[in-house]
Structure formats: structure tokens, C-alpha cells
Image: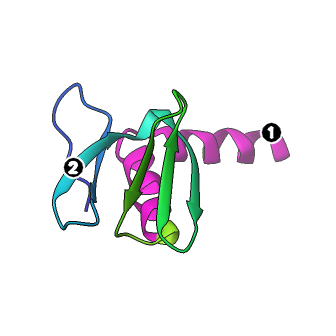
């Protein structure tokens, strides 16, 4: 589950040393596995995390659903298709 604080656009991920930290989900540009999962932000900063690429993707999707971006996009696509 994604825990959100008012005004924050963060997801919680885990460093390789086991410590949790938060990333701004709006700035995530790429997620790669080298085999370690590396998250690259739009500013070029890279973070290696314990979570798999799939797990990070799920956290991002859950975050966007929590702020009603995905639901809104799904609704717009359905309207355009009709």
C-alpha cells in the first residue's frame, strides 16, 4: 500500500542496505534491472533498490490511482473510443 502525506508525491522503496526511503513518483523516468533494480529520475539521479522493477511499477500505478490520475485517464480513453 502506498502511504501518502498531504502535498507529497512519493512512493517508499528500499535501499540495498535495507533502509527505506521515498522517491517522487512524478519524476521517475525509467526502471531497469541490471540485475539490481535501478530507478532513474528525470533529473538523472539513479537509485538502486531491493524491489523488483515489477514491484516499483506496481507502487507507481497504485500512487497514480490514489491521486485519481489512472482512473481519469481510463475514463477519457473509454469516452474517446465510443
Magenta residues span: 55-82
Q: What residue is at 72 percent from the left and 48 percent from the top? A: 78
- Residue 1: quarter of image: bottom left
Residue 68 lies, in percent from the top left, at 43, 40
In the depicted view, which residue is nearer to us: 7 or 13? 13
Mark 1 or 2: the one toward you:
2
In the depicted view, which residue is nearer to us: 61 or 24? 24
User: Real-space Cα distance between discs 1 and 2?
Assistant: 39 Å
29 left or right of 1 in image: right
Q: What residue is at 20 percent from the left and 66 percent from the top? A: 17
Instruction: Indicate whether residue 47 is drawn in magenta.
Output: no
Q: What residue is at 48 percent from the left and 33 percent from the top? A: 27
User: Chief secondary structure of the magenta span?
Assistant: helix
Residue 49 lies, in percent from the top left, at 36, 62
Asked if one can make out residue 82 in the rendered structure from this viewpoint, the answer is no
Q: Earlier in the sequence, mark 1 or mark 2?
A: 2
Question: Helix or strand or loop: what does disc 1 sit on?
Answer: helix
- Residue 80: quarter of image: top right
- Kindly give the residue lying farthest to the right in the view shown: 81
Residue with the mark numbered 1 = 80
Asked if one can make out residue 32 in the rendered structure from this viewpoint, the answer is yes
Residue with the mark numbered 2 = 21
Amino acid at each position: 500500500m502506498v502511504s501518502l502525506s498531504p502535498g507529497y508525491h512519493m512512493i517508499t522503496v528500499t535501499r540495498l542496505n535495507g533502509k527505506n526511503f521515498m522517491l517522487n513518483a512524478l519524476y521517475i523516468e525509467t526502471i531497469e534491472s541490471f540485475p539490481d533494480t535501478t530507478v532513474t529520475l528525470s533529473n538523472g539521479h539513479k537509485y538502486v533498490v531491493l524491489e523488483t522493477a515489477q514491484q516499483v511499477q506496481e507502487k507507481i500505478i497504485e500512487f497514480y490511482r490514489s491521486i485519481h490520475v489512472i482512473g481519469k485517464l481510463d475514463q477519457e480513453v473509454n469516452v474517446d473510443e465510443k
